Image: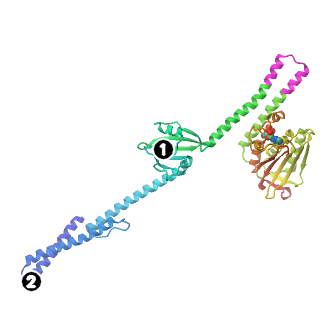
Amino acid sequence: MHPLLARALLALAMALVGGLSGWWIGEAGRLPAAGALGGALVGHALFLAQDAVRAGRLLRWLRTQQDHPAPRDTGLWGELGYRTERSLRGRDQAVEREVSRLAQFLSAMEASPNGVILLDANDQIEWCNHVAADHFGLDPVRDRMQRIANLVRAPAFVAWLQVPAQNEPLILAGLDGTRSLSLLRRPYGEGQRLLLTQDITERERADAMRRDFVANVSHEIRTPLTVLSGFVETMDSLPLSEAERRRVLGLMTQQTERMQALVADLLTLAGLEGSPRPPTDQWHDVVALLDQVVADGRALSRQRHVIVLDVSAGAAELAGSRHELLSAVGNLISNAVRYTPEGGRIGVQLVWREGGGAEIEVSDTGPGIAREHIPRLTERFYRVDGSRSRETGGTGLGLAIVKHVVQRHGGELVIDSEPGKGSRFRLVLPASRVRAAHRVAG
Ligand code: ADP
């Protein structure tokens, strides 16, 4: 039954019962009509009182947080309470769902590797993730609703913000001294703007390195080429005696060898960069390996140096690429021979390290290297003495190759040197890559 009809019937029934009771009581005093009227009024008043109590209960519930169920009355008030409660619960759930979706959305933006800033129509920060905060030195909570131009004052940035439509990213270089950022801006909503920031410091550095590398390689190749073409011209235009012709051909061969060495080193580096890590289960005899590179070193030295191989550490094995390890130790010995003056001493030895692992050490009594050059020696084409390096057939890539090889084997290259006191280059290898040979069976 419809609650309003039920309610009307209840009011009528209460008045009727009251009226009948009044009639019955009134009859004793011979005033049945007055009794009936009074009884009906009392019945109606009771109905209103009951109504007021129920309405009061519902009102009290509505005035609270509605965290407990609505009063479970019968009739109209019961239904009103139940329906209000259901609608409020439904709305609460919808709000909760929206809040959790918003939280999920914001945490997705928080997880972004790029910075995200939401700006309102006045360029005030509505929200920003931690990456953007870090890029600009902002506080995601404290700086909310601050104008971004008041916080990020780089003139290029402020000017860029004022240009209405901007599809090109802005590159902000040198922020915090060294950092470079790429910024993109996109409009959304009602005049709001999305600002995306990306740290491109590494990319810029890699680009600069690539540019330098190409410039260096071009320079290294152009120099011998220029010399060669000069000789070709000389041979073509001048009548040369046999002795002169031989001398020129000798010099031309030198330049060709220089270019060949450069290309070989470039290919070695490219090979190291593009190939997987050397195997950890292919073991090579260290003494045999050192014997081979020392023999090559002696051939290069042509008796001008004393080259001593110390294998007193005993038989050992190295895991990795024999070819790469030969090239690394070979480069160190070749450097020692090339830079150490005649009569100098070159030592090669394997030393076990206390904490595990071992090192292959190549030391010399050469000119040594000043402290400021040491950290840069492994940079490609970095030379302390350019003319000495070129005269002796150096490419400027040797130590870059050594460092690469040792790092690929999980180790590091350590250089100790002092001008006038010689140099010591150590390939420090981890315990996982080097072991005493008696522990092994094949
Ligand atoms: P390069 O082909 O010029 O020898 P490297 O990368 O092998 O190139 O070495 C970089 C620079 O380090 C060399 O140009 C040289 O100045 C210096 N250097 C390397 N080994 C020695 C050494 N044993 N004694 C003195 N200087 C050295």
> Ligand 1 lies in which image quarter?
top right
Residue drawn at point x = 6 percent, y = 81 percent: 30
The region drawn magenta spans 228-251
Q: Residues within 10 Å of mark 2 (few under 14, many from 20)?
A: few
| Residue 69 painted magenta | no
Q: Of helix, strand and loop, which one carries label 2?
A: helix
Q: Residues within 10 Å of mark 1 (few under 14, many from 20)?
A: some
Q: On screen, 244 above or below 28? A: above
* Labelled disc at residue 152: none
Residue placed furthest toward the bottom: 28
The amino acid on which the numbered mark 2 sits, given as a three-letter code, is Ala
Does ligand 1 reach within 8 Å of label 2's beta carbon? no
Q: Looking at the picture, tell me which residue is in the foreground, 438 or 300.
A: 300
Question: Percent position (x, y) of residue 119?
Answer: 46, 45
Find out whether residue 247 is within the magenta segment: yes
Give x and y (percent) for residue 338.
Answer: 85, 38
Q: Which residue does the numbered mark 2 point to in the structure image?
A: 28
Q: Is the N terminus in the top left, top right, bottom left or bottom right quadrant?
A: bottom left
Please name the residue that numbered disc 1 is placed on: 194
Q: From the viewer's perspective, is 136 left or right of 212?
A: left
Q: In the figure, residue 200 lies in which quadrant? A: top right
Q: Does residue 435 lie above or below 377 as drawn? A: below
Q: Give the residue type that dot 1 points to.
A: Leu
Q: Position of residue 108 (x, y in %)?
A: 51, 51
Q: Position of residue 427 (x, y in %)?
A: 80, 49
- Tell which tag, 1 or 2, sits nearer the viewer: 1
Earlier sequence position, callout 1 versus callout 2: 2
Say which residue appears at 84% left-offset and 59% top-offset: 439
